[in-house]
Image (tube, rainbow, N blue to C red):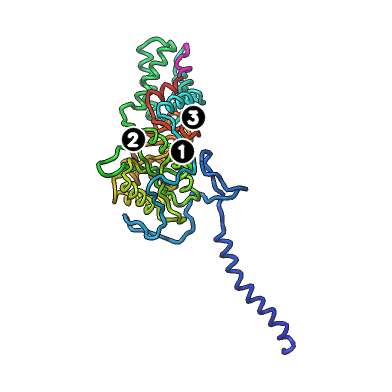
């Protein structure tokens, strides 16, 4: 036995060392997990040289740091700029006037792959409009995401008017279709943005939506719209879960000379960042504070509850005048399901519909408005910095009908 001990002791010592290393190595493996990131094509923040990975829109594994409603975290390391000094690292651009945007966006919609207006005009200008034609009209409208109820309403109205008119010249058919489409899109809805400063506080706007619809890009583009209207704007980077989200938003702001309130702490409480942004907006007497929020899946109860908390915390300081829901027009009816859930958590006041130039489904405008009872206020028809503009009912219908 004494002869074996000298051999066993080194082996036992090695096993002890290896046993201690295994948990450490396993822990390092878990904490080092990276998720492939996605970048918006219009993201002004460039990825690191030589590539790299970014975290997706999901919570960063950071220490839990909660703040009670209406109270900012002490030591949050939130950057609250006193003014726009120091933003000259990126040349300040002059945003295009809103009128110029509208003209260009209408031209893009006319040139897009729009089968809604063109298809309906072709069908209704047929020599003979029988049941087969009306079935095709109905199918075209449903494929354009108009929705069942609005589709039946439009088909019934067109049937009756074509029957009474007794003629089907292309000019008359187009006029009839234009009138009925305008009624469906509803020109009576108030599509103005609530961006007027109150007596002693700024107007406050929240921008919400699911992952990947381009909320941060939309906030940046909308900041350009407001600057073009001579508004004094401050941005709040309350998307604290996505890597580089705050830097992306700050870069958008710098391009038009707008300051951004953000935290340097990964996974910081979004409500606290939003609170500090609104507080800074009040102190600096700006016209509008825009708060960018993290993307969240509508079926994730915890994340949706957090969104409600962000709004409640802001309201400790100022009224939330506008809650814009960003939707991707290409998602069709799935966008309606998203809209319903967000409307239950926060009081949606308007819709921003992006990627409308890349889809033939223009009917989604009507379907969303019918679902929520709130108007589409802004549309995006491209990836350029100034490709966001206020929605105009008649201009939209005229573009559909070319």
Sort mark 1 into few (<14), some (14-19) or many (20+) by Cα contacts within 10 Å: some
Sort mark 2 into few (<14), some (14-19) or many (20+) by Cα contacts within 10 Å: some
Instruction: Pick whichever of labels 1 and 3 is earlier in the sequence.
Output: 1
Left or right of 54? Residue 347 is left
Question: Is 50 part of what is drawn in magenta?
Answer: no
Residue lying farthest to the right in this orientation: 3
Q: Which disc is residue 357 wearing?
A: 3
Q: Secondary structure at mark 3?
A: helix
Image: magenta residue range? 121-127
Residue 190, quarter of picture: top left
Q: In this rendering, does residue 264 appear at all? A: yes
Count of all numbered marks drawn on residues in the image: 3
State the separation of the CA atoms marked 2 and 1.
25 Å
Residue drawn at x 36%, y 11% is 165
Residue drawn at x 56%, y 54% is 34
Task: Please identify the quadrant where the N terminus is shown.
Answer: bottom right
Residue 109 in picture, x, y percent from top left: 47, 26
Mark 2 touches mark 1? (CB < 8 Å): no
Which residue lies under the disc numbered 1? 92
Instruction: Pick whichever of labels 2 and 1 is earlier in the sequence.
Output: 1
Left or right of 182? Residue 6 is right
State the separation of the CA atoms marked 1 and 3.
28 Å
Which residue lies under the disc numbered 2? 193
Question: Is 125 part of what is drawn in magenta?
Answer: yes
Q: Nearer the viewer, mark 2 or mark 3?
A: 2
Q: In this rendering, does residue 376 appear at all? A: no
């Amino acid at each position: 036995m004494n002869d074996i001990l000298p051999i066993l002791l080194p082996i036992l010592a090695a096993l002890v060392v290896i046993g201690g290393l295994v948990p450490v190595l396993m822990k390092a493996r878990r904490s080092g997990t990276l998720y492939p990131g996605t970048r918006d094509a219009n993201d002004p923040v460039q990825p690191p040289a030589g590539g790299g990975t970014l975290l997706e829109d999901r919570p960063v594994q950071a220490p839990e740091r909660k703040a009670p409603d209406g109270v900012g975290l002490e030591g949050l390391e939130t950057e609250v700029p006193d003014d726009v000094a120091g933003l000259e690292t990126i040349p300040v651009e002059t945003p295009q006037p809103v009128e110029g945007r509208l003209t260009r966006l209408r031209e893009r919609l006319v040139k897009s792959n729009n089968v809604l207006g063109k298809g309906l005009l072709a069908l209704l200008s047929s020599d003979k409009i029988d049941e087969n034609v009306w079935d095709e009209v109905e199918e075209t409208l449903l494929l354009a995401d108009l929705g069942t109820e609005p589709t039946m309403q439009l088909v019934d109205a067109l049937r009756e008017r074509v029957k009474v008119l007794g003629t089907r010249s292309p000019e008359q058919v187009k006029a009839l279709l234009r009138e009925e489409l305008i009624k469906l899109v509803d020109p009576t809805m108030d599509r103005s943005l609530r961006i007027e400063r109150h007596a002693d506080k700024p107007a406050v706007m929240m921008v919400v939506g699911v992952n990947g619809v381009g909320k941060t890009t939309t906030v940046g583009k909308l900041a350009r719209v407001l600057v073009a209207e001579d508004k004094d704007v401050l941005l709040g980077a309350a998307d604290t879960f996505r890597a580089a989200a705050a830097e992306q938003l700050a870069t958008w702001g710098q391009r038009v000379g707008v300051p951004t309130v953000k935290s340097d702490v990964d996974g910081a409480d979004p409500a606290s960042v939003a609170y500090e942004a609104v507080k800074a907006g009040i102190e600096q007497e700006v016209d509008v504070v825009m708060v960018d929020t993290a993307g969240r899946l509508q079926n994730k109860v915890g994340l949706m509850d957090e969104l409600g908390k962000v709004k409640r915390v802001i309201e400790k300081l100022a009224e939330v005048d506008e809650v814009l829901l960003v939707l991707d027009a290409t998602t069709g009816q799935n966008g309606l399901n998203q809209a319903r859930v967000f409307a239950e958590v926060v009081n949606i006041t308007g819709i921003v519909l992006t990627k409308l130039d890349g889809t033939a489904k223009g009917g989604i405008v009507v379907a969303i408005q019918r679902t929520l009872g709130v108007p589409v206020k802004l549309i995006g028809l491209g990836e350029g910095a100034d490709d966001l503009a206020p929605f105009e009912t008649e201009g939209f219908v005229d573009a559909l009908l070319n």
